[in-house]
Image: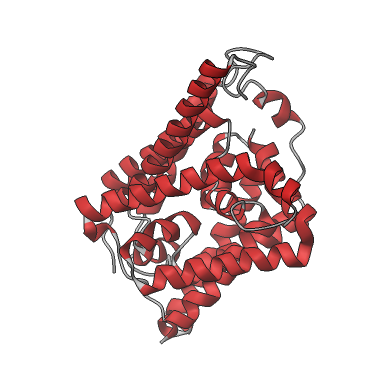
Amino acid sequence: MTHFTPIPALAGGMLIGASASLLWIVNRRVAGISGIVAGLLPRGSSRSDRRERSPEISWRALFVVGLLSGGLLVELLHPSSFGPTPVPASLTIVAGLLVGFGTRLGGGCTSGHGVCGLSHLSVRSLWATLTFMATGVVAAIVVQHVLGGGR
Amino acid sequence: MIPEMAGDSRRQAMKGQSVGVFVSGVIFGAGLGLAGMTQPAKVIAFLDVTEHWDASLAFVMLGAIGVHATFLALFSRRVPGGDGVGAQAPAVRAKSPTVDLRLVIGSAIFGIGWGMAGFCPGPAVVSVVTGWRTPLLFVGAMLVGMGAHALAFGRRAEDAGGRAVERACS
């Protein structure tokens, strides 16, 4: 059981919105984490391929390094912001596979569709967000109550 | 993105852009931590509406969309057709790509994984700094899932998916 924390939640959300706005100003890019991370995966191996992709790789890498630095800052200042995963490792791995595959097929995640897409009034992102919210609710209920937390 | 410039000022602009991208990442990571998104139990307590519902995540979305949507509304049409922030947004939005099966099925699969472990991509990546086993397992599996999509649908399909978001959003 966790506690309702509206103030830090709102403040943290506002930081996320500010970050997405800053990224839009400096790079005219959408702060979708799944897309940014997926863009870092190795693809073509030819030299011209790599040269063509190098600017795409560098801003994404820089953003991910920033993301990890932000995480380190939180770890230093307020380590209790990190909590354990309340399901077994096997379920965590299956969940990770689904999240990786699904975000690529659907073209975005909570940040790309949920925060950025909705802010841009995108109809696609609205459908995506409603869909992953709905299946997320069902999956959480099934795992917690039908599978007993997977234990 | 950066207009034609002489070498020095161009380099300087690129440096400023890099700093901006990095700072944006830092703020995003810190925001996720402050918001409580890096506690999977909290995310699960939001999605599992049957008991002890924790509505915090709704406030995260409210804060994030409130700030970003306000920013876009104020600045995206300032210089019509020019190089202002989000100058293209209204035109692109008018002919934004349609909702297709791939979008809905992909989002449904993502939601199932999200609800199972309480991690979406951002908080999982940020949680890697703890050195704990589960975020590492999750992120590793997530990368494998992304790779599997690229293998199954090929590079073009991946690009189409990625660009679709950018088109819808830019």
Number of numbered discs visible in the structure rendering: 0
Side of B165 relative to B70 (left or right)? right
Which residue corresponds to the image point at 58% horizontal and 30% vertical from the top-left? A28
Side of A54 relative to B160 (left or right)? left
Where, quadrant-wise, is the C terminus of chain B in this rendering?
top right
The picture quadrant where one finds residue A89 is bottom left
Side of B86 relative to A142 (left or right)? right
Give coordinates of residue B45: x percent, y percent. Answer: 37, 65
Q: Nearer the viewer, residue A3 or B38?
A: B38
Give coordinates of residue A128: x percent, y percent. Answer: 63, 52
Which residue corresponds to the image point at 64% horizontal and 58% vertical from the top-left? A42
Q: Name the residue furthest left.
A: A77
Give coordinates of residue B71: x percent, y percent. Answer: 48, 26
Can residue A135 be seen here? Answer: no
The picture quadrant where one finds residue A2 is bottom left
Residue A27 position (above or below residue B8): below
Give coordinates of residue A72: x percent, y percent. Answer: 30, 53
Which residue corresponds to the image point at 38% horizontal and 56% vertical from the top-left? B37
Which residue corresponds to the image point at 66% horizontal and 13% vertical from the top-left? B80
Can residue B130 be seen here? Answer: yes
- Say how the picture is coloured: secondary structure
Q: Nearer the viewer, residue A52 or A59?
A: A52
Q: Nearer the viewer, residue A73 or B55?
A: A73
Residue A124 position (above or below residue B116): above
Q: Name the residue furthest bottom.
A: A151
Where, quadrant-wise, is the N terminus of chain B in this rendering?
top right
